[in-house]
Image: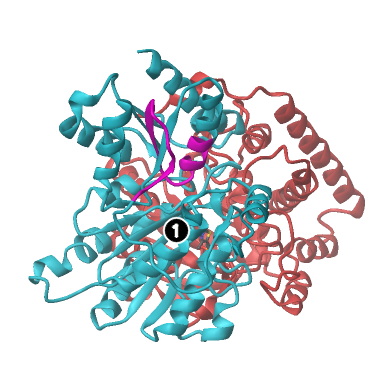
Amino acid sequence: MPWTKVYPDRTEFENARKESGKPLRGLTYREAIKEAFTQILEEDSRVFLIGEGIDDAGGVFGTTKDLHKRFGRSRIIDIPIAENATTGIAIGAAITGMRPVFIHMRMDFLPMSMDQIINHAAKWSYMFGGTVKIPLTIRSIIGRGWGSASQHSQSLQALFMHVPGLRVAMPATPYDVKGLLISSVKENTPVIFIEHRWLYEHVGYVPEDMYTVPFGKGVVRRIGRDVTLVGISYMMFESLKAQEVLQKHGVSVEVIDLRTLTPLDEDLILESVKKTGRLVVADTGWSNCGVAAEIVSRVSEKAFKYLKSPAARIGLPESHTPASSALEKEFYPDYKDIVDVISKKVKE
Amino acid sequence: MKMQGIDRKTFIWLFETMLKIRMVEEKIIELYPDQEIKCPVHLCIGQEAIAAGVCANLKKTDYVFSNHRGHGHYIANGGDLNEFMAELYGRVTGCSKGKGGSMHLADTKNGFMGSSAIVGGGIPIAVGAAMGSVMQEQKRISVVFFGDGATDEGTFNESLNFAALKKLPVVFVCENNFYATNSPASARQALDNIYKKGLPYGIPGIKIDGNDVGEVFEAARVAVERAKNNKGPSLLECRTYRWKGHVGPDCDFETGCRPRGELDRWLKKCPIERFRKSILKEGILSIRDIGDIKESLGREIEKAVSFAKSSSFPKKEGLLEDVY
Ligand SMILES: Cc1ncc(C[n+]2csc(CCOP(=O)(O)OP(=O)(O)O)c2C)c(N)n1
């Protein structure tokens, strides 16, 4: 299926297109987001976008650019720099039947809204016996590089995974970002939707019509037999690079892209680990109490006897993002780190 | 231009400081395309009078807190220029040892206790520092610089209440440049009344021309006096304009972020040019004196750039240092 394929760059996509002879339409991740918004805003008058500067010339790195011209500023709403209250306001609108999408330029601004997200959005439905629904999507972006420093580069998905009542999506491909964004808006639950800025230029197959990608369904991006490698968000692409390198050295890696973290496609991982006997998880966030920690513990609870070697986590060290480019290089793991870890694992 | 009550020495200090901020920023614009300064920079060209006018009233021991647009505050508060440049260049000799970059300057020797890149993040911390100072009977006042965008935040409103409640020695300095990134104030605030936002709590507020250094100096003097005399917090709304884009060395009217005409009107209100004219008129400095000041600042800046470029990058081991 074309959407299970990933094309690390445009040339690869173009080649694939020529070879297939089929009319595959390529879009960047950025364009796919904008297309999802355009279509869903058109289809459903209850949908509105709200966030700081979403109607400005840049339009959230191009993903909302000029949407206000088409849909008006009553549906594409710029707001005061007041994240917590505005989250509550979006929750309130959602309770009345609207379908808000709250957009944050960076994930680091979500902590401002933690009270409304954790104490309110996540719990409101449960506390009232399911009589109220919160169809709210909160979209935010992870950055990396260029001295973003400690307060402009955090990958906080694990915080949200920890709290029941929130769904967490981390799509890596243009196909998934469109489909999952549409799913998020259509479903009646609060969703934390996390993008990585380094994915914005990636090109992939994106159908023109509206489609949804289900929550809780991961995909095998590369089939392999020696080790299961789960790559989260941008780390999925580093995982693919690692897979290629390792293949040359005779190590066969199965690369899994979860697409959503809550719900988590546990079955897909367990099935793979039962086959390969090894597990490595590469996340964009911290390892400690992180996404990878959760995956590793589920595997040790449910498939321990299949493991031929201890599972491994690849994530950020116990530190904050340094501004200096020299330290940034040390801070972020990449495909070489994955290759190192896996090379050791297969020998253990 | 308000200038009563400013002595000659202060006059010259204010002028030099504003010029220094301007020239440093212009140097950054010149160097940034080399891509050796690998961090976002939020320039404060056009806003120099506020940093200078406020800091001229502070003692070394007073506490200062800043935000993402903090170059001017750091310099006006007496921060070391070498360490500043080195921080921008990501070197270990930087004021934050290369960990912070342009958005996270600190200079604890001079009471500059840090800059938050989270809008409104530094405001309650400044209030807390004022409380700490009172608890320890230190008589150090606390000043916090923030933009008009920060007054939208809960932290601003919650901090005003607490500072008023406890009568803390804080000066809240809002640099109202009418934009938060590219959102105009009119898209974020129902009324144009930031200086009044402390009034319900009993905090006096004043709206001033932030491009008139004399006016800033005088308003800050009164606020600092109040703080020192246990009369509690004050709020200064200094109206100004940033000449460059929100982030980076370029202008932003080309990309449609702001109207060109608006920038042109503000360029005519250049705080430095206005002050220079008064200085010449009053005969405080001659054209030649001003030329000498420029030259010596130019040398100091060049020296700082060389210092930065010749400093080492932090070592790998530094990554885990200072995490607690
Ligand atoms: C809590 C939070 N929300 C959003 C941002 C993104 N952001 C960075 S600067 C800025 C605008 C700040 O405007 P203002 O406080 O007026 O300061 P100025 O940049 O105009 O000096 C915004 C929204 C942020 N850093 N922190």
Whether residue B57 is visible = no
For label 1, the SS is helix
What colour-coding does the image apply? Answer: by chain
What chain does badge 1 belong to? A
Chain B display color: red
The quadrant holding residue B85 is top right
Magenta residues?
A218-240
State whether residue A69 is above or below residue B286.
below
Left or right relative to A75: residue B36: right
How far across and down, in percent of the image, does residue A102 sit? Answer: 40, 69
Q: Is residue A233 magenta?
A: yes
The quadrant holding residue B180 is bottom right
Task: From the image, tell me which residue sits under label 1.
Answer: A176
Identify the residue at horizontal 16%, vertical 63% (top origin): A123
Residue placed most toward the observer, B83 or B211: B83
Q: What type is the residue that disc 1 sits on?
A: Asp
Q: Residue furthest right?
A: B288
Left or right relative to B14: residue B220: left
Identify the residue at horizontal 31%, vertical 45% (top origin): A158
The quadrant holding residue A323 is top right
Q: Residue furthest top?
A: A348
Whether residue B44 is visible = yes
How far across and down, in percent of the image, does residue B49 sit? Answer: 66, 59
State whether residue B31 is above or below residue A44.
above
Chain A display color: cyan
